[in-house]
Each structure stands twice: as structure tokens, then as C-alpha cells.
Image (tube, rainbow, N blue to C red):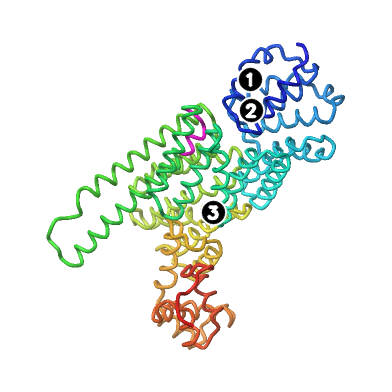
Amino acid sequence: MSAIPDQLLAELKDCVAQRRISDGFALLDSHAALFDSFDAFSRNAPAFLGYLAQWVDIGYRDSDLVKRLLACYSKESRSGLPLLSYAHLRMAEAMLAMSQEEAEAAIGHLNVVLTLADDVNDPELVAIAHYWKARCQRKRGEYDHALRHATKGRDLALQCGQSSMAAVMRVLESWILFQEGRPKEAFQTLSEAHAVLSQTDDYVTLGNIESTYGRILRREGRYGPAIEHFTRSIELFQKRDPEHRNLARTLANMAHVQRLLAQQFRKKIDADAAHRRKSGTTGPATPQLYREKMEQLRQEALQNLDQAARIYEQHPNHRGMGTVHLNRGYLYLDEGQLDLAGEQADGAYICGEGKQDLILMARARILQCAVENARVEEGIEERLDARSHAQAALDYARDAVEMAKHTQNRRLLARVHTWQGLTLSNHFFNARDAARESMNQAAAFLEPGIHDHVWEDFQILKGRVLEGADMNATLLAWSHGQVGDKTFQQLEEDFADIVIPKVWEQEGRKVSRVSKRLSISPKKVRRVLERLGLRPADATENEPD
């Protein structure tokens, strides 16, 4: 093979930077003969392979093409390459590792490229290395490091005058901000990226933007608008590839929202039934429309998950398939199909275990914990079996906590501590003090102002801990000096947890009034309310001075 033209490399590089995706794909197709006649030692061959890896990452063909061309370079032959050529090969290896979901190996290759940054004199290549490393770290739940590399990549791209490339990196930046509990910043960053990329045909990144909008709205409980964004995301992915892997991810996200909507209808049905029992009403029951809509949403969710699973079978992705298992499991759990829910939870854990994905493994443990708790709470087993299910639930919860501790995923940390508390406070253990400790730990990770299903689980835990206990018995025990191994400060905190929320309700939820009535600082009132999840950390009061 003759030398690869400089012009071809320049055009490939420019199309990546400007996000001219269709042009880049067409350019590669027009030079497809290079793939079969690839000469590893011809001029520009390593750079060509490096750019090809970037295009495969974007969606051109598949990683097997890069793997085949990389095999042309032996370990010995690489030692004589110029630094920039060597950096391109390590970028190709990083992309290959990413495609195989080997984040640690990918980071190893990218670290080499970043170490050579000052010597290769290619800031755009270095920008992409930072971006790819951020993606790997985000997958591992290392959000602080991921955000740092995402912003470095973005800044380098902007210094090179590549605003479109920088916008792609800002999409990742927005997702990390969202995961860190900074939704307003995430939304603003996403909007700025969308304004730039809407002028391109980068349908995959545009689909990612719509999907991220949907996930932010879903967490805020705005399910209707979330579905609208997921629908647009699906349409954009299908423009690039009807079976695109990211399409599967959005279908799974859509299914999750459909399940949450179905739960809302179930709550309406249950609330109506409870009201009828209490009032002795003999009129018409809950409108059949509610039941029909609930079942329709469940079936649509299952259909979306089936489609997502088919795509993941073609484009394997352990976290994606694990998420499909989890969503199916929760749909089964809602219907009391505990054996099926448990099977899906086990499947999700196996998906995560194969890649040591602590986030997915912890999520699977939460579902396994919920299934075992359901067996205990339903009381359908003999006591010996109830003991085994209760212990299994607690073991799963503790596993989840240990796994989540190795990540910076605050939402996951809130969930694992909440479910450990729910398990400790179930009918079998009824360990209220231990459950309170879990509740306090969960409260530290809850996102202010977000009242979603994670918050609802926390409210159930809080209700058990704070309202389920016999307050009079507690106060009587204290009056007789029965304080266990608690310090005076811990007793003071327990008393504050009991009294302050009650007074806060009586005083119209005004911190200043509670402070005045109890002669304590507003700061302490806020701290107690925030710890119990009753008041967001950034809440303000609309009351006169």
C-alpha cells in the first residue's frame, strides 16, 4: 500500500472536530480499500488507524475493524515509531478496550497518551484522550475525576477553535453534574451544548442530549415531558442506525418512566379502595380506566425492554443488559411475582459481576434485597423461612452498601442506606435504632428538592423510624436512666428528631418560628430537618422578617 495521503487525514480529523458525521462516514467508505491493503509501515498508517478508531467510536462499522488493523503492529515494531504515531496506536487500543467495556485497560492506554501530551504536539488528540478517560471514569462512578478530565478536554478543544467538539464533551460534563446532584447546572450546560450541535448531523450526540433531558425530568417527577424527550431521543438514534446501542438504553429509560407512571395509577386505585373501606362507600369502584391504563403502561414497558434486549444481543453491553434485567425485575416485583423478580435481579448481578461493575452490582443487590423483604412482609412463609429471607435481605443490603461506598454515586448511596434501613426496620428485625442510623446516612446523600421514588422509599423508612416507635415508652425509659450505650449528645439528637419536626408542622413549617419557640438556633432546626429529609438544604422561607 502506498502512503496514506495527508489530505485524507486532514479531512477525517476535520469531520470529527466539526461533527460532520455523514461526510466522515462517506469519506471512509470511499477509501474502504485501505482496510484490506493496510500496510502498517507506510507513511501515515498509525495516524490513519488512530482516526479510524475515533470514527468507530462515533459509530462507523465496528471495533473488529480496528482490532484487525492493530494486529499488524507487533510489540517490537512499535518501539521505533515516532511519539505521535505511537500515541495514535494507544488511542486505537483505548477505543478497543472501551468497546469491550474494559475501563481500567482503556484508562491505562489513555494515561500513556496524556503523559506524552507535551511531546506529541497535537492538542486535539489530547483533548479526545481526556474526554475518553472521563467517559471511563464516569462509568466507574468516579465523578470528581471524570468531571476534571471532561473540562480539560473541553477547554483544549475550545483553545483549538473546535466548538462542536467541545460541545460533545459538555454533554458528558452535564451528565456528571447531574449525577453529582447539580441539576440546574447540568440543564444549563446541556442547553449550551445543544445550541451548538443542533447545527450538525451528529444524531447520536443529539440523541444523548434528549435522553439526558429525559432523565433529569424523570428524576424531578415530570414524567410526561420526560417521555417526550425520550421519544425524540429514539427518533434521533434511529436516523443514524435503527438498531443503535444507545437506542436500547433510551428504551430502557422509557420503560422505567412507564413503570413509575403505572405505579401512580396503582396508588390511585389503592387510595380509592382505602377510602371506600374507611367510609363504607358502596358506590362505583375505581374507574376501570385506571386499571386499563396501568396495565397498558406495564405492557408497553415490557415491550420496550424486549426491544432493548434484542439490540443488546447484537451490540453486547453489560450495564445496558443489566439495566433491562433490573427494570423487568421491578415490574415483576410490583405485581408480586417474586420468583420472576428474583431471577431478573440475579441476571443483573451476573451482568455486573462479569465486569466488576460496582454500580450495577449494587443496584442488583438492592432489587434482591427488595424481593427478600417482600417475602418477609407478606408473611407467606413459615417463621424459619422468614428468618432466612430476612437474613438474605440484610446480607444483600450490606453488600450493596459496601459496593456503593467505592463510588461517588450519591443517588446510589442514598438508595443502599435506605434499603438497609428498610430491612432493619422490617417486621422480622424491627431494629429501630440501627434503622435510624441508616436513615441518617441516607439523608446525607438525598438530592435537595427531588421527590422521586428514591425519596418515597426514604419517607417509608422515616415513617417507620420516627412514627413507628412508642414515643411515650421511649421517654419513660429515658426518665429511668435506660439509655443503653448512647451518649448524651446522641440522646439529645434523638429528642430533637422527635420534637423539632412536630413543632415545625405546628408553626406552619417556618424555621424562624421554631427557633423562637424552642429558643434554639435556626441553624440547628435546619440541620435536623435536612437530616430527616423534611427540608431541602437549599430551601428558603417566604416569611416576613
Q: Pick whichever of labels 2 and 1 is earlier in the sequence.
A: 1
Residue 535 spot, x, y in % from top left: 48, 70
Report the Cα–Cα distance between label 3 and label 2.
33 Å
Residue 11 spot, x, y in % from top left: 68, 25
Which type of secondary structure does the marked residue at label 1 adopt? helix
Q: How many residues crowd around disc 3 within 10 Å: few (fewer than 14), some, or many (20 or more)?
A: many
Q: Pick whichever of labels 1 and 3 is earlier in the sequence.
A: 1
Quadrant location of residue 340? top left
Q: How many residues crowd around disc 2 within 10 Å: few (fewer than 14), some, or many (20 or more)?
A: many
The answer to whether residue 405 is visible is yes
In the rendered structure, which segment of residues is drawn in magenta? 243-250
**Label placed on residue 55:** 2
Quadrant location of residue 193? top right
Report the Cα–Cα distance between label 2 and label 1.
9 Å
Give the residue at mark 3.
412
Viewed as shown, does residue 435 lie left or right of 334? Answer: right
Viewed as shown, does residue 378 lie left or right of 436? Answer: left
Which type of secondary structure does the marked residue at label 3 adopt? helix
Circles 2, 1 touching at the beta carbon (< 8 Å): yes
Amino acid type, callout 2: Trp
Report the Cα–Cα distance between label 1 and label 3.
42 Å
Give the residue at mark 1.
28
Indicate which label's residue lies in the foreground, 1 or 3. 1
Residue 146 spot, x, y in % from top left: 66, 48
Amino acid type, callout 1: Leu
Q: How many residues crowd around disc 1 within 10 Å: few (fewer than 14), some, or many (20 or more)?
A: some
Query: Main SS of the magenta segment?
Result: helix
Amino acid type, callout 3: Leu
